[in-house]
Image (cartoon, rainbow, N blue to C red):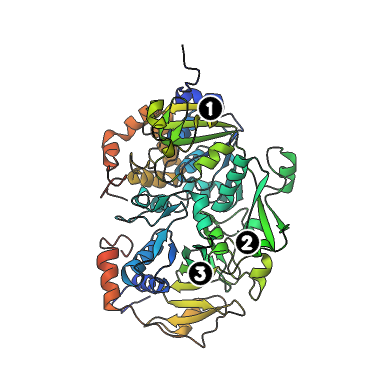
Amino acid sequence: MKNNQPYTPREIMTIMAAREIKNGDIVFSGTGISMLAAMAAKNINAPDSVIFFETGAIDSLLEELPFAVADPRIMYWAAANSRLTDAFATMQNKITGDKVIAILGAAQIDRYGNLNTTCIGDYFSPEIRFSGSGGGCDVASFVPRCIAFMQHEKRKFVNKLDYLTSPGQLNGNNSRKEAGLRPGGVSVVVTNLGVMRFDKNTGQMILDKFYPGITPEMILENTEFDMDISKAALADPPTNRELKILREECDPQRLILE
Amino acid sequence: MKNRLNKVIPLKQAIEKYVKNGSHISIGGFTLNRNPMAAVYEIIRQKIKNLHLYAHSNGMGLDELIGAGCISKLEIAYAGKGKAAPTCIRFAKAIQNNEILFEDYSNYMMSLRFMAGSMGVPFLPTLSGFGSDILTKWGFSKTLRKSDPKIPDEKLAVIDNPFGNWTDASKVLLVPAINPDITIIHVQKADAMGTCSIQGLTFADIEQVKASKKVIVTCEKLVEKEELRQNPDLNQIPFIHVSTVCHVPLGGYPTAVYGCYDYDSQYLRNFATAAKDQKNFKKYQDKYIYNAKDHKAFLKVVGQKRIDAIAADPRTGYSVNMKRD
């Protein structure tokens, strides 16, 4: 898609996700663009947010961008280097649990914010096999607020997932609670076209913001399921300050921004 | 008098003794960090087959073992190893081509399964995974489960909270314990008796070791007992859990060992490229694994230049400003 804006799609996605992170949040991060969003929030709008990883490192000093959640770069100057069971306990702890916000990616998402990171095609004999849940299913089960990062394409925003790896609102209405899950799951979806949230009652995805140069209709064209666009508004584009910090302080080598 | 608690033997002998065709095994580390790679390569050289591997997120070790045809059954949460291969390539191929039986769990579930095994209980509960296909889709059939005494009859189970609504949970999801025949981990320091000191994240290594019927420890540095006893707070695994110790410097290469060396992103990328094509992969395996008689010979093929490039900086524990692919 042509982009005549003074920022790239990756830059606006990163800024939109960073704005979701509040000061004092404990940010569960993967690598790549989700790591960059967590770092952008820390540098721009949430200086006291804390980044942590499912492998157990908490509040590491990230002098270099890690390439994986077990990268030795996350082990340096951490508040604690612990282990997997501790990291998942952090998401359910009485003091820390409610402050956790997670950033997840997926191959497919449905209207209820359920995610597939396992396979395309039949589970037992897939066309494409992906890495699998990792901590994704646990995070979507435990964490009250989750940001999903997605490329906005019809084959990714689907009516039915090929495999439900990480639970969102399941079948909507009260089904998440009835299944035995605590409140949580994907609460906001940030794509290269806009920002989606979920209706509190039905659990269905609704369009919240569309980016400059994008229309709600374009977003519907790239989504397999119906979505309420009646309350959608134009997003505030990234400010010069946000872009400057993102480019000069968070990823000066453009390892992720390209 | 010979110290009867000296458990040090050569790696080749340790693998011969403890890893058999059909063994249920687990390996330590996570994606591109602290995988016991020297042991993995030795298993491949000894052509041990039909292994049942329990993994949470063992990237490189897992993909080498699958690529060499050593694994017939796999229980796993995540198969990826960072930028070079977000999904492990031989793993994906093996599943797409129906070459292995596999069962998906999450990282927390696999960690709890090892923890259950280490505690001697049949299962542990969690509130993760309700409503997911992890719960409903079983890679190992009921028939297979019933016929194999080493595999539990159920993949997992959901029960009502026996304590009513205590802690606001109406149900719990139970994951079965794992007790591997053998667990292999690679650590920074061990003594001849097997006491281990791990630096950096321990991932699920401690639970894996304590769940296992036998344990092989490979270590970067084989140190005197006194060195470890001076700082017991830094030792995670006491010798009583360890069956044997192998001194293997660079035994985690090409994955990272915190404080010692970084991952070799160039090696990982070359592996990923070769793994995509059967012919190239065979060439890769011949060059690095089969034609090298042991880990020392393997490292010779790799070359000192790569080893120098990944040496850890003493301040940060990784290779600062290393060129990363």
First in sequence: mark 2 vs mark 1: 2
**Chain letter of disc 3 in the image:** A
In 3D space, how far apart are the residues under numbered discs 2 and 1 (Cα atoms)?
39 Å
Q: Residue B101: x percent and y percent?
A: 62, 45
Q: Secondary structure at mark 1?
A: loop
Mark identifier at residue B149: none
In the rendered image, the quadrant that contains the N terminus of chain A is: bottom left
**Chain letter of disc 2 in the image:** B
| Same chain check for tags 3 and 1 | no
Residue B168 horizontal side relative to residue B230, left or right: right
* Residue under numbered circle 3: A145
- Amino acid carrying mark 2 in the image: Ser
- Amino acid carrying mark 3 in the image: Arg
Position above or below: B184 against A229: above
Q: Residue B260: x percent and y percent?
A: 33, 39
In the rendered image, the quadrant that contains the C terminus of chain A is: bottom left
In the current view of this chain or complex, which residue is farthest to the bottom? A230
* For discs 3 and 2, the disc positioned in front in the rendered view: 3
In 3D space, how far apart are the residues under numbered discs 3 and 1 (Cα atoms)?
45 Å
Position above or below: B198 against A199: above
- Considering depth in this image, is B126 or A93 the residue closer to the camera? A93
Q: Residue A107: x percent and y percent?
A: 51, 63
In 3D space, how far apart are the residues under numbered discs 3 and 2 (Cα atoms)?
18 Å
* Residue under numbered circle 2: B132
Residue B75 horizontal side relative to residue A244, left or right: right
Q: Residue at x 50, y 48 (%)?
A: B57
* Residue under numbered circle 1: B243
Task: Place residue B136 in its image quadrant.
Answer: bottom right
Q: Secondary structure at mark 3?
A: strand
Local packing at callout 3 (Cα closer than 10 Å; few below 14, some 14-19, many 20+) is many
Residue B311 horizontal side relative to residue B3, left or right: left
**Chain letter of disc 1 in the image:** B
